[in-house]
Image (spheres, helix red, strand yellow):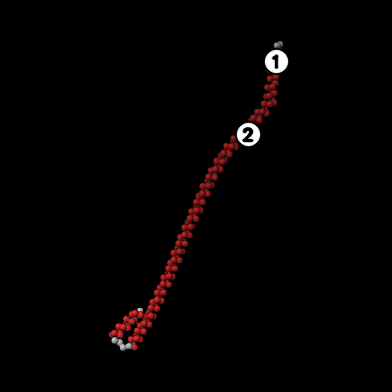
Amino acid sequence: MNPTFMTLLGQMISFAILIWFTVKFIWPPLMSAIEERQQKIAAGLAAADNAQKDLAQAQDKVNEELKAARSKANEIIEQAHQRANQLIDAAKADAIAEGNRQKALAEAEIEAAANRAKEDLRKQVSLLAVSGAEKLLKREINANDQKALIDELAAQL
């Protein structure tokens, strides 16, 4: 036999033993590690997809909550505006009522002052009339004296 053939045969047997050893002892753990890694990657991708879906759902929920909060805030603001308008209207009504009351008091005071002035004027006129009558009775009545007394009374008024 030829030494190259024996070398080739030895190498073939060594290679066959190496393949059998690799297939029997190395390949199964390697394949299980690869499959396990593939499963982990697939699980990670599925988890990422689920996380994106959950994120989208959470974002939708946040948007809905924001809309609800904005509408509630707008409702509260509208109620505050209505309450402010009610308070303003009530204050205006109170101010008008107070103004009318003060106006009535002022008119009553003016009327009372006018009545006092009229009463004072009546007293003065009656005193002048009595005074004029006394002067008339003390003097003799003639046309010139009467005219002078009337002029004098008119000057005093």
Q: Nearer the viewer, mark 1 or mark 2?
A: 1
Q: Is residue 17 left or right of residue 131?
A: right
Q: Nearer the viewer, residue 36 or 117?
A: 117
- Secondary structure beneath label 1: helix
Quadrant position of residue 146: bottom left
Mark 1 is surrounded, within 10 Å at the Cα level, by few (under 14), some (14 to 19) or many (20 or more) other residues, namely few
Q: Is residue 106 left or right of residue 43?
A: left
Q: Which mark is residue 147?
A: none
Q: Check disc 2 and report the residue beneath it.
A: 40
Q: Which residue type carries mark 1? A: Thr
Quadrant position of residue 55: top right
Q: Earlier in the sequence, mark 1 or mark 2?
A: 1
Assign the C terminus to one quadrant of the image.
bottom left
Contact, mark 1 vs mark 2 (Cβ under 8 Å): no
Tell me where residue 21 appears, x and y as whole percent.
Answer: 70, 23
Image point 66% across, 28% down: which residue?
Answer: 30
Image point 62% across, 31% down: which residue?
Answer: 38
Q: Check disc 1 and report the residue beneath it.
A: 7
Image point 39% across, 80% down: which residue?
Answer: 123
Assign the N terminus to one quadrant of the image.
top right
Tell me where residue 67 appears, x and y as whole percent.
Answer: 51, 47
Q: Nearer the viewer, residue 99 or 46?
A: 99
Mark 2 is surrounded, within 10 Å at the Cα level, by few (under 14), some (14 to 19) or many (20 or more) other residues, namely few
